[in-house]
Amino acid sequence: MGKGFNSAKNKQAELARKMAIAKKQSAINNGHDDSGVGAGEDQSQTEEERKLEEDRARFAQMLRDSKVTNPNPFEKSDEIENRPMRVRVAARIEAPKGRKTSKVVKRRKESAAASKGEEDDVDVPLREGDIARRGDFETLFCCDSGGPVGPIDAARLVPWVPPFVADYIVILADPRAQSHDLRRTVQYLTSNLAPDVLRQTIAINSDEVTETEAWIHRAEIDTPMRIFSDRNWAWMRRYSAVVGNGRWSMSITVIDNAGVIRNVVRDVDPSKASQLVAAAIEVIK
């Protein structure tokens, strides 16, 4: 029994040896040798080379995608030559605030001087030969609308500024409240003068707008003339319709299309107003 056991054992050992030899031979044929250290070193070295090649390829791709300019000025490539140039815009330098050109400063000084001159003589009454101002008419109240004339309607009213709608303007002015002379004159002129003359004639009183409207309605006045209110006598003082010695009366003022005050008649008799207006207009023509 002992002899049979040893024989079986020897056969197993021989089989194991033959299997080891076959395995080793197979490894050699496939380029792998598990028993040698050099084979492991070759395998490890090949893996490192593969990673190095991948890193190099990734780095090359990064260089291609990069927008950094060519570090070598002598090196030329299609990619660099065809790359569009970037223009750097210089920052705009703002001028210091408060500093103006000499021309602007000069114009402003001249304008300020002219304005100051007008303000200085604002209380000086105008007389024949003086120049009228559109601004003096802007503060009048229109009996048609009930509001102040303003700059636009004042330009349409006076003949010496655009749009130059008239050749002259005739102004009846009376500082007295509910003046019978002024009202009768409006009626006389409406009956005796042509519509073209009446459209260039206005009346200025010191009554409230509503009071004037009520009188026009009661008297059934139908006239191309326009009537305005000067409650604080600002226009009348400016154009000498109110005199300093206390004399109160109706006056007629005629201004031509150059803004020149051509005629001022005081103490007007309503019955003679039509003749006075016609004579003044004839002189201007």
Image (cartoon, helix red, strand yellow):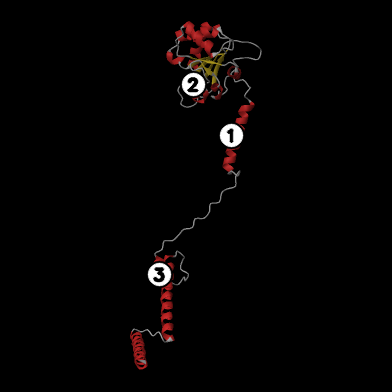
Q: Say which label, 1 or 2, has the lower sequence index.
A: 1
Left or right: residue 254 versus residue 31 is right
Dot 1: element = helix
Extreme-right residue of the structure: 245
Q: Which mark is residue 77?
A: 3
Q: CA distance from mark 2 to mark 3?
A: 79 Å
Residue 272 visible? The answer is no
Residue 243: % across, % down: 63, 14
| Circle 2 crowding by C-alpha within 10 Å: few under 14, some 14–19, many from 20 | many
Spot occupied by residue 231 in the image (x, y as percentages of width and height): 58, 15
Tell me the distance, in whole angstroms, between the alpha carbons under discs 3 and 1: 66 Å
Element carrying mark 2? helix
The amino acid type found where label 3 is placed reads: Ser
Check disc 3 and report its element: helix, strand or loop. loop
**Amino acid type of the residue that numbered disc 2 sits on in the rendered structure:** Leu
Pick whichever of labels 3 and 1 is earlier in the sequence: 3
* Front disc: 2 or 3: 3
In the image, what residue type sits under mark 1? Ser
Q: Is residue 38 above or below residue 181?
A: below
* Rendered residue at 42%/65% (across/down): 65
Q: What residue is shown at x 50% (from left), y 13% (from top)? A: 277
Q: Is residue 217 visible?
A: yes
Q: Which corner quadrant of the image does residue 57 belong to?
A: bottom left
Q: Nearer the viewer, residue 50 or 15?
A: 15
Residue at the extreme front of the image, as rendered: 1
Q: Which mark is residue 111?
A: 1
Which quadrant does the N terminus fall into? bottom left
Q: Which residue is mark 2?
A: 157
The nearer-to-camera label among 3 and 1 is 3
Q: Nearer the viewer, residue 97 or 260?
A: 97
